[in-house]
Image: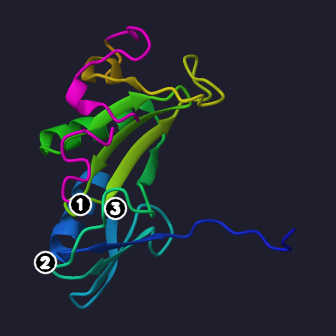
Amino acid sequence: MNDFHVTLGHAHLKVRDLERAISFYTQFLGLRLTERVGSQFAFLSGGTLHHDLALQALGSAAPGTPRHAVGLFHLAFEVPDRQTFAAAYHALDAGGIPVAAVDHGISWAMYFADPDGNGLEIYWDTRHEPHGAQTWNGRSDLLNAQRIDGVAAPSGPNLVVNPSLTRDAGETAPGWRETRA
């Protein structure tokens, strides 16, 4: 057993175009630019830390990660409530970003990709909500905009709202890692 404890401090993503990445993460995730090192690095934060996300520009010719390679699948950002989840969903939708939204029981999650194909998730922890579950158990029921907005009740497990937005828990969602080799 270790005599120390760690917490996740930040994620470091490699991108092709730094300006495009900064714009995406500030516009769609509400992160703010805290520091920039020339045209190579940018640091963004969503809270009190200097940065939650480091971006490193590799240039437009940089290859993508092979789709089925070992490595990071997605980076997840938590929102505090249903209203914030819905606002994020609608912002991504209005921005033309393909999103696969699912109810995992323990959370509502939306999966999408940044302009470089890096997998991202925005989630709302629902374990303490009346409809929430304490364990995941593999559940991935699709969510539609009406349910996200709170104007429709659940229609049953594994309802297929739009087959192109499945993410078995969604890798086939339009835009989900399509830029990856």
Q: Which mark is residue 60?
A: 2
Residue 115: x, y in percent? 19, 60
Against 33, is 46 above or below?
A: above
The part of the image, by quadrant, that contains residue 64 is bottom left
Q: Position of residue 117 (x, y in %)?
A: 25, 59
Q: Secondary structure at mark 2?
A: loop
Q: Quadrant of the C terminus?
A: bottom left
Q: How far across and down, in percent of the image, does residue 88 sit?
A: 30, 41
Q: Residue furthest bottom?
A: 38
Q: Which residue is mark 1?
A: 180
- The mark nearer the N terminus, 2 or 3, is 3
Q: Which amino acid type corresponds to the residue marked 2 in the rendered image?
A: Ser
Residue found 44% across the figure and 14% down from its top: 157
Q: Tell me what residue is drawn at x 16 percent, y 68 percent.
A: 20
Residue 163 lies in magenta, yes or no? yes
Q: Residue at x 20, y 78 (%)?
A: 62
Judged from the image, the secondary structure of the residue bearing numbered disc 3 is loop
In this image, 46 relative to 179: left or right? Answer: right
Residue 50 in percent (x, y) is at 47, 75
Disc number lying in front (3 or 1)? 1
**Depth order, front residue of 113/65:** 65
Q: Amino acid at mark 3?
A: Leu
Separation (CA) of disc 1 from disc 2: 13 Å
Q: Nearer the viewer, residue 73 or 115?
A: 73
- Tell me if residue 125 is in the magenta stretch: no
Region rendered in magenta: 152-180
Could you give the CA–CA distance between mark 2 and mark 3, rounded to whole angstroms? 23 Å
Residue 118 against residue 135 in the figure, above or below: below
Callout 1 crowding tier (Cα within 10 Å): few <14, some 14–19, many ≥20: some
Q: Nearer the viewer, mark 1 or mark 2?
A: 1
Kindly identify the residue that appears in the image at 56 percent across and 30 percent down: 106
